[in-house]
Amino acid sequence: MLRYERIHKSIWLLLSSILLVEMLRCGLSYRAYFEGKADIEMGLVDAESLIQRTIPKVETALLANDLAGALAVLDELETMVLDENAILAYELGIAKSYEQIDLGLPYLKEAQRLSPENKALEQLIEKFTLIEMEEDESYQAILLGQALGAMNEWAWARIAFEKAVTETPDYAEGWAFLGKAQEMIGMDGKEALLKGYHLDSQSVSALVFLGDYYVTHEEPIQGTSLYRKAIELDATNDVLYASLAYGYVRAGDLQSAIEAFEEGLVAVPYSTDIRHAYLDFLLFYEVYLEEKALPVVEELGALSDYGMTINLYTGRIDLALGNFENAKVYLESVVNYEPDNLKAQFYLGVCLMQLSDREGAIRSFENALELDKDLIYTDQINSIMDTIK
């Protein structure tokens, strides 16, 4: 059973980022990438139009716990994958993997061929290739669900986790992940989460996911208590400290959140992930920018060559401190080197407004609007543009 405790860090990072989304206002969606591509680049000829109208039925079936219905929808469209449709190849790759992993891989590879720049898909194929070699069916189902969860495909992931607990009813990890998947698609996962916890109260997954439930359901003190127990079991898991900090934020205790981040820096001194989370927290609340944020940026630079990331953080800190000329230098360096950097375009626009450069601000905000596919800053930008145009 020890192998059931193996948790890939990618799933922890994804879940932590989802937990922090309300606080940090950020997000990611693989399917949105393809849908945006479809809206812009795919001419709606008959086959394409049919695919785009039909694919949403797959998600509807999955949410209704109708795996057979989802597979039937995709089977009807299967011949159209020859039309080089990346969305359909991707969906078929996942669906066929439920029958047998090696049946899905050719479709996923076809989707990758059609969108070679998508690294997330490349990683999914690598994971599926490894999953194929796992002989234990319950554990294979868990790995499949984890891989899909890391792609934000929680409706598909839930089906995999349900398969795991059906085949092995006393599988604590399976129940914990099932409860988490249910929560991620808008269902109430408490029953499954509690079952996982009661089956194994020493399972880090069961502790963390139940903690997540309490934090997001307005019981943050219970959540932070469970995070603490998880840290006792896995003290070098940097993501746990970010979850603990978020729990304190939901409890209205920012000072304890800061202490949780600081504790993580001591426990995992070489972690860049926790430094990024800590910096985003400090910048979001605009606290301790000189005392804590700037030293953390220097630490990031010493740990690894982060290039424009360091400049972006420095520019944002200077902007928050009112050092607008300095902020402009750093933010422009990022935009010049990475013109598609959404954050840099947005904060440069804010900076230029402070410097009374109306035309430059409008130009940066318009660039940001074009890049803001997930609508992170769109409302703020539109509000600002209404006042300065």
Image: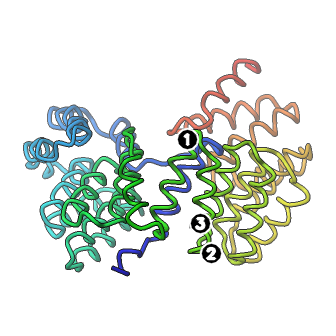
Of tags 1 and 3, the one toward the viewer is 3
Q: Which residue is drawn at 48% across and 70% down?
A: 202
Percent x, y of residue 115: 34, 57
- 190 with respect to 15 (left or right): left
Q: Which residue is identified by label 3?
A: 229
Of tags 2 and 3, the one toward the viewer is 3
**Image quadrant of residue 172?**
bottom left
**Which three-letter amino acid code belongs to the residue tagged 3?**
Lys
| Front residue of this view, candidates 51 and 250 | 250
Mark 1–mark 3 distance (CA, rounded to whole Å): 41 Å
| Front residue of this view, candidates 13 and 7 | 7
Kindly state the secondary structure of the residue where label 1 is placed: helix
Q: Which residue is identified by label 1?
A: 371
Q: Which residue is identified by label 2?
A: 235
Task: Indicate which disc, 2 or 3, sits on the residue closer to the N terminus.
Answer: 3
Of tags 1 and 2, the one toward the viewer is 2
Is 365 above or below relative to 33? above
- 5 with respect to 374 (left or right): left
